[in-house]
Image (cartoon, grey):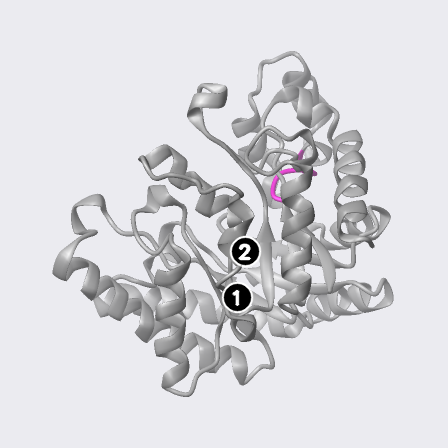
Amino acid sequence: MRLGRDFTNCLVFDYLTDEQKRGVAYGQIDPSSMNALAIAKAKMDVERQIQVTRELGFEHLELDADSPNPYLNFDAPRRRAIREAAKSSDITLSLHLPYSYIGGSLCCPQDSDRAIAVELHKRCIEFASNIGAKYATTHPGSVPWYQRAGRYFDRARDALIRSLLELGQFANDRSLALCLENNTAFDGILSEPEECLAVIAEVQERGIYIYFNFDIGHWLTRADVGKPVPEPPENVLEPLPPDMLKELHLNDYVPKENMGEGIFHPPIHLGWGFLKRGNLERYARLVKRKGVEVVVLETAMKSTAQALERYELLRAESEFVREIFGV
């Protein structure tokens, strides 16, 4: 099993201008605006992400193709260069497919809209294949709150299955494993493991093999929609079928009652959310027992202080996680 990283916004500060960096340091530019200014530049520098992944002692890198996404503009030589850089560093790759704007429409019941989303995902899967990625992960898509129940839900689910059949075949033809990731509870659709597994099983019954990328942090958001989080939370992995698992996302969630607002993807070694060291040790044992191929750690810088101390946080977190997983 390999440990990987999706850097989300962890490296964005490095790609600001000197003036913008001063603006962040003095509180004139908040973290959200920092992301807007430079996240596309950070995503573009794949070789740097590969280098930092290796420096932190990890063996896998997940690239994020959500908007803004520079990857579709990369020409064939650039794609080959990424493939070679990853291979020379012994870093395997995966791609997180788009999940907002057009990318969130894989479950749209209107076929004209859904077809546009599928085409976007195919272009991203083609990029993933060109750079030698092994996995591609997609969210189920987003649904308006007034269309999340009854026949509306059935229509969205059926549309998602049509999309997954097409994308799963497209990925399989390019030697990629397509993984479906559970939504957050706030998305109101397909946030629970059993819902996602049922969709995956239906796709597999039709001869297209896709897999489940269980994101435990997404699942923990149930705490802020009135659903209990069982203790210990990592036991949610127990019933997951090993033959449906390849890549998993690891991150935590801090509920509103703890910090005044929900916090996605906090540095996991800080223990702010549900996953303390003991929980993570049991999590590691579970995923190893199930034969998971790669676990991708997702962390985000949520404050100016974290952005300024990003490398110290990343090094401390990486050492903590590697020790838990024994790598």
The magenta stretch spans which residues? 7-12
Point 50% across, 41% down: residue: 231
* Cβ–Cβ under 8 Å for marks 1 and 2: yes
Which residue does the numbered mark 1 point to in the structure image? Answer: 124
Q: Residues within 10 Å of mark 1 (few under 14, many from 20)?
A: many
Residue 12 lies in what quarter of the image?
Answer: top right
Give the position of the C terminus as an image quadrant.
bottom right
Image coords of residue 81 (percent x, y): 77, 66
Is 41 in the magenta? no
Q: Is mark 2 on a helix, strand or loop?
A: loop
Horizontal arrangement in the rendering, residue 123 relative to residue 197 (left or right): right
Image coords of residue 194 (percent x, y): 38, 61
The amino acid on which the numbered mark 2 sits, given as a three-letter code, is Ala
Q: What element carries label 1?
A: helix
Image coords of residue 175 (percent x, y): 60, 81
Horizontal arrangement in the rendering, residue 296 relative to residue 138 (left or right): right
Which residue does the numbered mark 2 point to in the structure image? Answer: 65
Image coords of residue 110 (percent x, y): 20, 65
Secondary structure predominantly adopted by residues drawn in magenta: loop
Q: From this viewpoint, which residue is outermost toward the top?
A: 26
Point 70% across, 34% down: residue: 269
Does label 1 or label 2 sit earlier along the sequence? 2
Horizontal arrangement in the rendering, residue 112 relative to residue 268 (left or right): left
Task: Tell me if residue 168 can be seen.
Answer: yes
